[in-house]
Image (tube, rainbow, N blue to C red):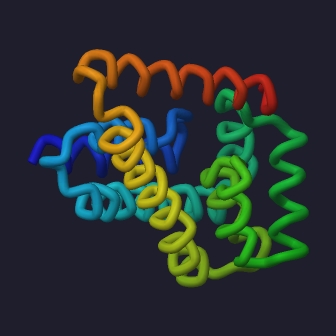
Amino acid sequence: MKKSWLSGIWGFAEATLFFILPDVLLSYYALDKKHNLTRLCCITLLGALVGGGVMYCWGQYNFDTAYHLVESVPAINDELMAKVNEQLKSSGVLAVFTGPLQGVPYKTFAVQASAAHISIIEFLLMSIPARLVRFLVIAYVARWIAFNLLRHLQRRHLVAVWGGVWLVVYALYFYHFPS
């Protein structure tokens, strides 16, 4: 039960102003076969949808404040926000799906979707595959790696590899997307 709540809260937090992906938590859960990854990914999705809805509404009702607060999140800057604006204008609601797959934070789309004339229903419906596909892929790839490629490692070494991978991922991400 605790894992479910944490997954949902993390999904919500990352969709709003937290900058560490729920994939970190989901891939950690993947290191233990007793966890139902599909269930945890769906709960994470629910949290992300609530968070995305909050950000959408905030952007709709107080765009300037929401925009600038999102822009202040680590690895998000005015250039990235302008890129999201262009993607939303050129691709419409499809940008909500493709952008986060390219490493662009979901919250940047959520806060700007209303201004791009995307309804909250369209935004949330596109958010389902946009978020869930990545959550499932990361979780199940992590599980496959842990139990196939790294099966010989003791638990503590497996956790060390997991932590090392995420440290490298975030170092590269922050290098590529400086604030």
Across and down, in percent, residue 95 comes to 75, 69
Q: Residue visible at 52% across and 27% down?
A: 166
Across and down, in percent, residue 125 comes to 52, 80
| Quarter holding residue 56 | bottom right
Across and down, in percent, residue 174 comes to 72, 25
Q: Is residue 69 left or right of residue 84?
A: left
Towards the viewer: 174 or 116: 174
Q: Residue visible at 69% across and 59% down?
A: 109
Q: Is residue 70 left or right of residue 49?
A: right
Q: How many marks?
A: 0
| Quarter holding residue 80 | top right
Quadrant in the picture for the C terminus: top right
Outermost front residue: 152
Towards the viewer: 124 or 154: 154
Across and down, in percent, residue 150 comes to 37, 32
Q: Give the answer, above or below, for where 99 lies relative to 89.
A: above
Q: Residue visible at 27% across and 56% down?
A: 37
Q: Residue visible at 24% across and 20% down?
A: 154
Q: Give the answer, above or below, for where 15 lies relative to 73.
A: below
Towards the viewer: 27 or 69: 27
Outermost left residue: 1
Towards the viewer: 74 or 144: 144
